[in-house]
Amino acid sequence: MNNKFLLTTTLYILLAMPSFASNTTQASSENPDEMVAYLFTYFNSNDPKDEQICYAISDDGYNFTPLNDGYPVISSDTIAFTQCVRDPHILRGEDGKTFYMVATDMKSSLGWSSNRGMVLLKSTDLINWQHSVINFPTRYTKKWKNVIRVWAPETIYDHQVGKYMVFYSLRTSDPGSFDKIYYQYANEDFTDLEGEPQWLFDAGNATIDGDIVYNEADQLYHLFYKQESGRGIYQAVAKNLTDKWQMIEGHVEQTQEAVEGVGVCKSLDGKSWIIMYDCYGNGHYQFCKSHDLKTFEFVQNTATKGKFTPRHGTIMPITRTEKERLLKVFSNHNQPILSGFHADPEILYSNLTKKYYIYSTTDGTPGWGGHDFSVFSSSDLANWKDEGKMLDVKGDQVKWATGNAWAPCIIERKQKDGSYKYYFYFSAHNPKSNRKEIGVAISNTPTGPFVDSGTPIITDADRPNGVRGGQAIDVDVFQDPKSGKYYLYWGNGFMAGAELTDDMLSIKKQTTKNLTPKGGNLQTWAYREAPYVFYRKGIYYFLWSVDDTGSPNYHVCYGTSTSPLGDIQIDEQHYRVIEQLPEEEIYGTAHNSVLQLKGKDDWYICYHRINKNFIDHDPGIHREVCIDKMTFDKKGNIIPVKPTLNGPTPLKK
């Protein structure tokens, strides 16, 4: 072995985030070695800075969340001759605890015929990797000195030989040469390849991106590959890895798009196969399912966003322990927890579905001109699914309004028959009065469909005695755990409160009260808008927002009371809830809701902040939703919340 051309080192991943407490603390009944998720290894684009190995995790094998905020987990300039890698393939070893990864050593900006080798990596924890680089023209100086590309290597264990086979497509500059799949066996340490390249398979023309799996049902190896002339993915089968492969007719892919980089993985339940391939021309992955590796059913295209734009990679089942380790080391900055621009978040736990929901103002439009509300669901407070638009105030759903769908709230109420109803309160523009007014829509489920009551239940005239100016917006609903009664709060420029009628569709107007906190200024507790009420250990907490929603100083303060309708007392030593953190580019942290975990004294504040890129340009309509923990001291004072970039640790299911 010529050490001049075989670089072997031990690699410690450079980009791991600081560790934090495990987000899935094990219950004693859970098996730490149970396969519970999938690890996706991939690279992000043809830009050299993105030709690096990244990780993503999925519980179902189809919907993936990137780790490390989508940044690389292995830095290519520490492992590759070209300082770039592509096409990573990962394999769990026969011992169940050793992992093997191979990748193309290539910088695509140098041209598609510019790579000369591959990288071999080995790990026992998925975090720290030993690596070796093999450059073919200098490693095999006779027959293979004219190699111009070594593409998409993969690894499989050959039980007949008792060694790990590394197979890849290879092409030389010799006349008539085209890409064919070759193989070699790795040495025991997985630091080198034995012998020279041996032909494995080709389809008579350029054949690349091979992936091999063994199917116990038919006791055959299945080789999936891209055939360049056929512009699609095909397969061949063989009884043993080095036998002659029999090609099977028909395409694997379920699309007319150009595809490459197929990967096939057995599902966690062992009953089906996940088939994935890179629709490289359109920038997304496509996932299919098969029960027999003969017929293939389209499942979905993978959503790409931000830095998660996966290219040619592979997936592998991982255990509960491995998942926890990866989530701990490669933690994401999860804020904002909703993608896109959203504001005025209302958070709810549903006893019906056992899930969490956020309802928001749709943001990003001039003049706060959004006209619909979105709902998002989560089982862990960290990962949120967009459930779509649940109410549109511009159209037939809400006949009394035409736009300005703002600042909603919702409450779940159990009915006498054991079912649930959801009362969704919101403000919108009423063209008849030319004012903002408050309506209510009802549903039997947290995601709808919601049916509007037909008329506003709070009009501009329903303001407390003596209150001038302001708007009937920013509604909050609250059930008093002591009396069981329901209350509504609202107001910009003033804080109003009133008891709801038994049907939840109107207020008892004689109970309307001016609750506006007295005193303060823009640096302390001067009330602007967004009242929110919750109860803890005999105390009613009233929260509200100070300053303007477009101000970096927009923040939350609070006072307390012994009654759901005040009066509100303010402790001048304890009134702050959450404020901006300019040193971390966190601004305008306000307009909140509060969540208590069921049966626990664990609390979270859900709020919006100004997107840092718009702090000097339209900040008031470029807001994003965040969640952080909220705690109390022994006397019941709220300990000021420090807004974070990380967001909440996922709750254990």
Image: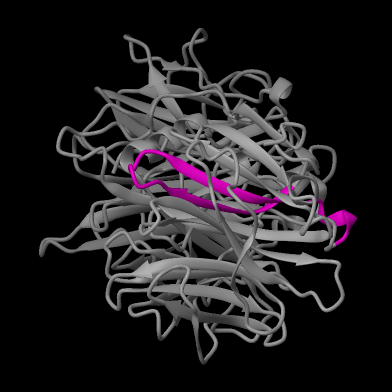
Residue 101 counted in the magenta span: yes
Front-most of residues 89 and 15: 89
Give the residue furthest to the front.
142
Give the residue furthest to the bottom.
249
Point out residue 255 in the picture as x, y percentages from the top left corner.
Answer: 59, 84
Q: Quadrant of residue 340?
A: bottom right
Point out residue 390 in the picture as x, y percentages from the top left corner.
Answer: 47, 68
Q: Quadrant of the C terminus?
A: top left
Q: Which residues are magenta?
A: 85-111
Residue in the image at 27% along x and 70% along y? 271
Give the image's coloring scheme: one colour
Point out residue 76 in the picture as x, y percentages from the top left corner.
Answer: 72, 39
For residue 263, side relative to residue 631 (left or right): right
Front-most of residues 601 and 481: 601
For residue 86, side relative to residue 108 (left or right): left
For residue 83, side relative to residue 242 (left or right): right
